Structure formats: structure tokens, C-alpha cells
Image (cartoon, rainbow, N blue to C red):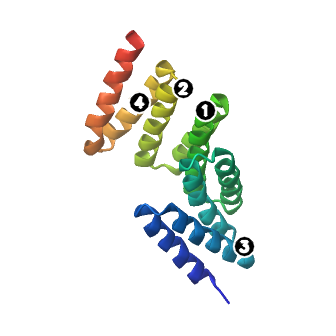
Amino acid sequence: MKNAEYAISLLKRSLEFYSKGKPDEAMALLKESESIFRELGSAAGIARSLAPQAIILQRQGQSDEALRLVKEAEQLFRIIGDERSLQNTLSQQAEILIGLRKFDEATKLCREAESICRHMGDPSALAELLMQNVAFISEKMGRPGEALPLAEEAYRLAEDNGFDDKLKGYMEVLVYLRKKIKK
């Protein structure tokens, strides 16, 4: 009988394949791990198998199927209370929705992901998420004015928490946004 340890090893091996540019091999392992976790009734395992499948499908241009999988992962992460993974799946969904030009839905998910980060009290994760949302809102949605306050907050978080490695990049984004708004 295949067990959780074996399914976890499949997840780890899938990441190795994916990082080596072998998405089809990674997908096969992810589907096998998902199947095992479903047999075992492990919501966490199922969700952790679905989320990377969605990434692969999204990159292959299969946005509808990717969205279906990441929504299922989201629901499972909500059930088990894994806020960090939930935040990641919300951001992943937002990225897919932006690609589908469903900006209002994407914005709602971005805001929920921000709220979760704030609740977790992780300033580094929040700063990263804010900058990701800046990219979504400014570049993909064409709304740099809405993105500027997020970039300013990310910069303040980096400055206040000593994330010196991030300050230069965040400042460049602020300068870019301010120039874009003035045009």
C-alpha cells in the first residue's frame, strides 16, 4: 500500500523535475501523489499536490483548468487552516484571473491575500506580496495610481524591518510608478 511518506516523496521529486524543465514528468508525479492523498483522505496532501499542478497548467496556457485546481486547493487550505498556503493560492488565482482579464475578481483576491499576510504578522511576506500586487495592478491592469500606495507601504516595511536587500528594488519601483503617473 502506498502511504503518505511515499506521496510526499513524489511531491519532492516533482519539484526536482520541474526545476529541471521537465513539467510533464513533474505533472505525472503530482497526479500520482494527489491520487494517494485522496485515498488517504489527506486534505493537506491533496491541496499540496493540486497547487503545483495549477502552476504547471497555467504556464502551459491551460488557465481554466489551472484555476479549477487552485480553487480546490484554496478550499482545502481554508478547511485545514493553513494561512500561508491559502495566501499563496489566492495570489496564484489572482495571477490566473489577471491573465483572463478578470481584474475585479483578481483585485479582491489580492486584497484577501494581503489581509491574511497582515494577520500572520510576517512583514517580509507582506512586503513581497504587496510588491507582487503592485506588479499586477500597475502593469497587468494598467492602474499605476492604485499600485503606488502598496509600493510605498512595501518600501516602509522593508525600511522599518531592516530588509536592506529589498530597499533598492522597492525604491526603483516607486520611482517608476511616480514617473508613470506623471505621464
Whether residue 114 sits left or right of residue 43 in the image: it is left
Question: Residue 174: x, y in percent?
Answer: 35, 25
Q: Which mark is residue 141?
A: 2
Question: Residue 42: x, y in percent?
Answer: 69, 73
Whether residue 52 sits left or right of residue 128 in the image: it is right
Q: How would you rate the neighbour count of disc 4 (Cα within 10 Å): few for under 14, some for 14-19, many for 20 or more?
A: many
What's the residue type where badge 4 is placed? Ala
Which numbered disc flags the more N-terminal residue, 1 or 2? Answer: 1
Q: Nearer the viewer, residue 23 or 138?
A: 23
Q: Are marks 4 and 2 in contact (CB under 8 Å)?
A: no
Which numbered disc flags the more N-terminal residue, 3 or 1? Answer: 3
Which secondary structure, mark 1?
helix
Q: How would you rate the neighbour count of disc 3 (Cα within 10 Å): few for under 14, some for 14-19, many for 20 or more?
A: some
Distance from disc 3 to disc 2, alpha carbons, whole Å, reads: 37 Å
Whether residue 4 sits left or right of residue 12 in the image: it is right
The mark lying in front, picked from 4 and 3, is 3
Residue 13 position (above or below residue 65): below
**Residue 31, quarter of picture:** bottom right
Q: Which mark is residue 151?
A: 4
Which secondary structure, mark 3?
helix
Which numbered disc flags the more N-terminal residue, 4 or 3? Answer: 3
| Residue shown at 51% from the left, 29% from the top | 140
| Residue shown at 39% from the left, 9% from the top | 183
What residue is disc 1 on?
A: 107
Q: Which mark is residue 38?
A: 3
